[in-house]
Amino acid sequence: MMDGFDMSSPLVCEGIVGDGCGGGRIFFIKEDALMVHDPVTKEEMVLCDNLKGVQKIDKHGCHITLSLKENNLVFDLSLMSLV
C-alpha cells in the first residue's frame, strides 16, 4: 500500500524514477479515467477519460498500456494523448 493505493491491483502502477516520464508518480484507473497521483504534492489529475473496460495498466518509459478485453490502447505521457 502506497499513499492509499493497492500497488498489487492491476489498475494501479508506479512510474519508476529515471524511466523517461512520470517517475515516482502513481498511475491508476478511477471511474473510466486514467489518473495520475503525485505522492509529493498529493495532487491528482485526469490524463484520459471515457476508458471503458480497462482490465490492467502497465507503464514502460513514456507509454502506459491500457489492456482492455478485446484490445490494447497506449497513452503517451510525452504527448499527453492516446497513440
Image: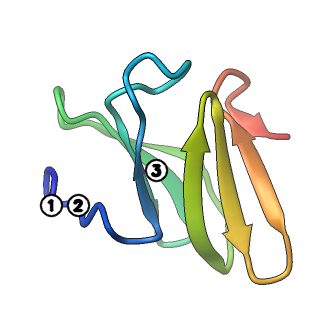
Identity, as a three-letter code, of the amino acid under mark 3: Met
Q: For this view, does 14 lie left or right of residue 5?
A: right
Above or below 24: residue 35: below
Considering the numbered disc 3 on the image, is that residue within a helix, a strand or a loop?
Answer: strand
Residue at the (16%, 27%) spot, across then down: 40
Q: Is label 2 or label 1 in front?
A: 1
Number of numbered discs on residues? 3
Q: Which residue is mark 3?
A: 35
Above or below 68: residue 15: above
Considering the numbered disc 2 on the image, is that residue within a helix, a strand or a loop?
Answer: loop
> Are circles 2 and 1 on residues that touch, CB within 8 Å?
yes
Q: For this view, does 6 lie left or right of residue 82?
A: left
Q: Which residue is mark 1?
A: 1
Q: Judge the density around disc 1: few (<14), some (14-19), many (≥20) Cα neighbours within 10 Å.
A: few
Q: Earlier in the sequence, mark 3 or mark 2?
A: 2
Marks 3 and 2, how far apart at CA: 12 Å
Q: Judge the density around disc 2: few (<14), some (14-19), many (≥20) Cα neighbours within 10 Å.
A: some
